[in-house]
Image (cartoon, rainbow, N blue to C red):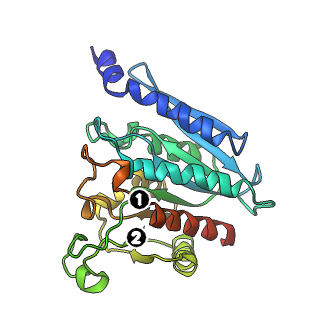
Amino acid sequence: MQINSYRERFGHRLGAADYIRTNFLRYTQRVFFQKYEIERVLFKNVVASVGPDTGYRIIVGANYDVQGNTPGADANASGVAALIELTRLLSKIKNLPFRIDLVAFTLCDYDSLSAEKWGNFMHARSLMENNIKVLGVLTLDGIGFFTDVPHTQHYPRNYFKWLYGHRGNFISLYLEKQAGLFPNQIRRYCKQYVKGLKVVSFKPLFSWKKFSEKTQAAYVKMGYPTVSISNTGPYRNKYYHYDVDTYETLDYQRMSAVVNMIYETLTRYKQ
């Protein structure tokens, strides 16, 4: 019964992994599935690599599952679309100084599962167990919804409205409090090379679960420096994790600005 339950709940998601792999393969041949099983049901992360085979690497990740049967345009097809476009752009760069792994995770949007079963945890643990040299990790979670309507942006603390405004028209960078060289450099490059979009960085003393409990948390637990790039999800997007989170609600111009910001940042990052 447990096996059938997993197949019914998650089996129809497996085709998404094949779709992502097919699109990754358009730009690099270094694509593989990271497979694991839960109750004899197979799950797959999808990994594409560009740059040198050896040496240090940067991880750029986004989850490709959705909550329930929702469309998940912002949460998180927007992040996966960014991974595919970044693969296309980065594959054209000759002599990248480090390897970039673009990873689409499974099972990150199911609160009923323990974190150890999420795809990002499996990937983070594999990096640690194989002693991979990681400069840092960027996670993308909801980068497609923006609005200039007043009083659409909310925060964990009300005083942030006085600092950053009440319109959902910016992209956020969430840095864990320990931060370090990698997150601070990423923040500097993002603010320098973004075009047509405001960047707001958060570095709170205490974790904000809605920002950090998903794709970012596994890497933080393993000790990797991380930056989460997001539109703040449910703090802004009232459609987040609902049936109305459809492609018509996305702002493709500002979403493209986010992807270009990440691309410019990655091509300029120096150890």
Residue 67 in the figure: left or right of residue 121: left
Q: Residue at x 41, y 30 (%)?
A: 13
Measured Cα–Cα span from mark 2 to mark 1: 12 Å
Q: Is residue 218 visible?
A: no
Quarter that holds the N terminus: top left
Tell me the SS state at disc 1: loop
Q: Residue 173: x and y, percent?
A: 43, 70
Q: Residue at x 53, y 59 (%)?
A: 137
Badge 2, how many Cα within 10 Å: few under 14, some, many 20+? many
Q: Which residue is mark 1?
A: 144
Q: Which residue is mark 2?
A: 172
Q: Earlier in the sequence, mark 2 or mark 1?
A: 1
For the residue pair 50 and 182, the one nearer the viewer reads as 50
Q: Residue 27: x and y, percent?
A: 70, 45
Q: Which mark is residue 7?
A: none
In the rendered view, tell whether residue 38 sits above or below residue 233. above
Residue 265 in the figure: left or right of residue 16: right
In the rendered view, tell whether residue 232 sits above or below residue 87. below
Q: Residue 60: x and y, percent?
A: 55, 55
Q: Residue at x 18, y 77 (%)?
A: 158
Indicate which label's residue lies in the foreground, 2 or 1: 1
